[in-house]
Image (tube, helix red, strand yellow):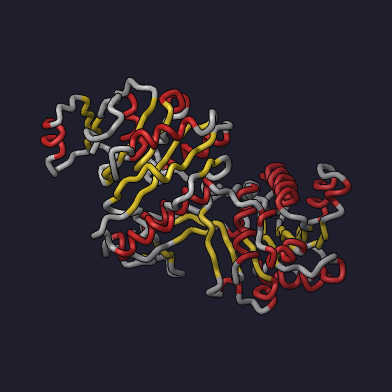
């Protein structure tokens, strides 16, 4: 189909990743000489490798799964650059073959519609049938470190820099395999991670039914300055940063359970307006009944009950933060609050999937595995390390009835960086 195009001013470059289907023998029959071999595959590596061999003004990408629909495919694709001087990338429509499986056909027909469009805010782009300016690739090559959506990551960079993407539905290809929406949970998880990073959540866009929930947020900080005297300065800095990050994300207030000494030090760093947002409970006071034997939920429950009269709004939820952790980022806070406000959940925590084996230490000093580690990876338990004190959203009802940690209404937001907790860590030999 490339040989039948009405436009013939192009060269063909093959990037081969250890193919076993006679690809190389076939392309040799067409006299193609620019062939590059790739051993370790990611989409970005393959695209960049082919682009390095190119000598033209435009780079046109055609997936091995795709076949041009007619002889006008290439001309129509490149005509897209004439639609607007800002266009840096053009992608075309993908349609199923008659024998394409129904689920793949549904994906293709749903995603690739018949109306052309200029995209100045939408990062969707699909390299299977696309073209970009060579000079754009020189400035912004594809990310070789990711295994999914390298095209959309590229498009976001282009649009952020002031460029636009154009969709030309008349430039069609048949796509044998569809868009792989029906895929393994592991691959789906990888795609979702990239999509979350691409489409950062903005709490101003939260669904209308959930906006009222944004007006009644409190943070909860439990901190024993006596036990953490050696790291007190760092903890104070972490809490100040958290308060300011929290204020940027949501219009909330704070409950602080600590010593008078910590509260006094805090007042010397925060301004008056910030201090007025804090309701302080002295953990060392006998009247507070907050002894060291109580767990976090019990102290939360006691603090909320005793502080209700001082609260401007009945709290929808508490964000728990331990200043021994670095401050929760704006993005993680937004993700936590978004997930809580738009879902029927009692607890949202930050966490990381634990890839290695995990073990539980018994009271007698022995250890046992927390999963059947002899099974294949895909059949093992999915174990997560959660960072409760790095930022966790608790519903007030789950604190009052002490059900938060046993609730099935729980979500884990995978954070991009594993928070490092200040202070000595236990080592078991």
Front residue (pair 414, 93): 93
Is residue 298 visible from the viewing direction of this image?
yes
The N terminus appears in which quarter of the rendering?
top left
Q: Is 202 on the left-hand or right-hand side of 17?
A: right
Please give the name of the residue rendered at 47% of the width and 48% of the height, measured from the top-left corner. 194
Residues 328 and 14: in front is 14
Indicate the position of residue 108 as horizontal and vertical percent values.
37, 55
Is 133 drawn above or below residue 183 in the view shown? above
Residue 19 picture quarter: top left
> Which image quarter is the C terminus in?
bottom left
Question: In this picture, is 272 found above or below 312?
Answer: above
* Residue at 53% over, 32% down: 84
Residue at the image position 68 percent from the left and 42 percent from the top: 234
Relative to 194, residue 368 above or below? below
The number of discs equals 0
Residue drawn at x 64%, y 51% as measured from the top left: 202
Q: Is residue 269 left or right of residue 294?
A: right
Could you tell whether 283 is left or right of 209 in the image?
right
| Residue 21 image offset from top left, x and y in percent | 14, 44
Residue lying farthest top? 55
Q: Is 110 left or right of 201, judged from the image as shown?
A: left
- The x and y percentages for residue 137 are 43, 28
165 vs 337, nearest the viewer: 165
């Amino acid at each position: 189909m490339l040989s039948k195009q009405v436009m013939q001013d192009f060269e063909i470059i093959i990037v081969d990743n250890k193919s076993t289907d006679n690809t190389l023998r076939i392309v040799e029959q067409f006299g193609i000489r620019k062939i590059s071999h790739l051993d370790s595959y990611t989409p970005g590596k393959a695209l960049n490798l082919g682009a390095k061999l190119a000598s033209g003004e435009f780079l046109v990408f055609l997936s091995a799964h795709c076949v041009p629909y007619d002889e006008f495919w290439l001309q129509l694709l490149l005509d897209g650059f004439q639609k607007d001087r800002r266009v840096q990338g053009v992608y075309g429509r993908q349609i199923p073959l008659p024998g394409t499986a129904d689920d793949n056909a549904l994906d293709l027909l749903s995603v690739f519609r018949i109306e052309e469009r200029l995209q100045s805010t939408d990062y969707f782009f699909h390299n299977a049938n696309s073209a970009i300016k060579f000079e754009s690739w020189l400035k912004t090559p594809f990310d070789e470190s990711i295994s999914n959506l390298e095209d959309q990551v590229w498009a976001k960079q282009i649009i952020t820099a002031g460029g636009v993407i154009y969709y030309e539905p008349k430039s069609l290809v048949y796509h044998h395999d569809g868009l792989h929406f029906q895929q393994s949970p592991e691959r789906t998880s990888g795609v979702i991670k990239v999509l979350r990073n691409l489409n950062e959540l903005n709490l101003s866009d939260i669904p209308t039914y959930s906006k009222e929930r944004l007006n009644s947020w409190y943070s909860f900080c439990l901190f024993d300055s006596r036990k953490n005297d050696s790291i007190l300065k760092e903890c104070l800095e972490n809490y100040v940063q958290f308060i300011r990050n929290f204020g940027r994300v949501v219009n909330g207030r704070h409950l602080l359970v600590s010593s008078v000494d910590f509260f006094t030090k805090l007042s010397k760093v925060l301004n008056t307006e910030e201090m007025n947002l804090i309701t302080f409970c002295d953990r060392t006071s006998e009247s507070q009944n907050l002894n060291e034997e109580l767990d976090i939920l019990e102290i939360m429950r006691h603090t909320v009950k005793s502080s209700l009269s001082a609260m401007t709004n009945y709290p929808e939820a508490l964000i728990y933060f331990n200043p021994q952790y670095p401050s929760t980022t704006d993005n993680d806070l937004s993700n936590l609050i978004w997930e809580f406000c738009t879902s029927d959940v009692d607890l949202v925590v930050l966490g990381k999937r634990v890839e290695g084996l995990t073990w539980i230490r018994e009271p007698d000093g022995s250890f046992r595995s927390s999963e059947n580690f002899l099974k294949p990876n895909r059949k093992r338990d999915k174990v997560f390390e959660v960072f409760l004190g790095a930022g966790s959203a608790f519903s007030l009802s789950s604190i009052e009835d002490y059900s938060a940690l046993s609730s099935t209404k729980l979500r884990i937001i995978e954070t991009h960086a594993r928070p490092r907790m200040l202070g000595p860590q236990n080592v078991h030999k």
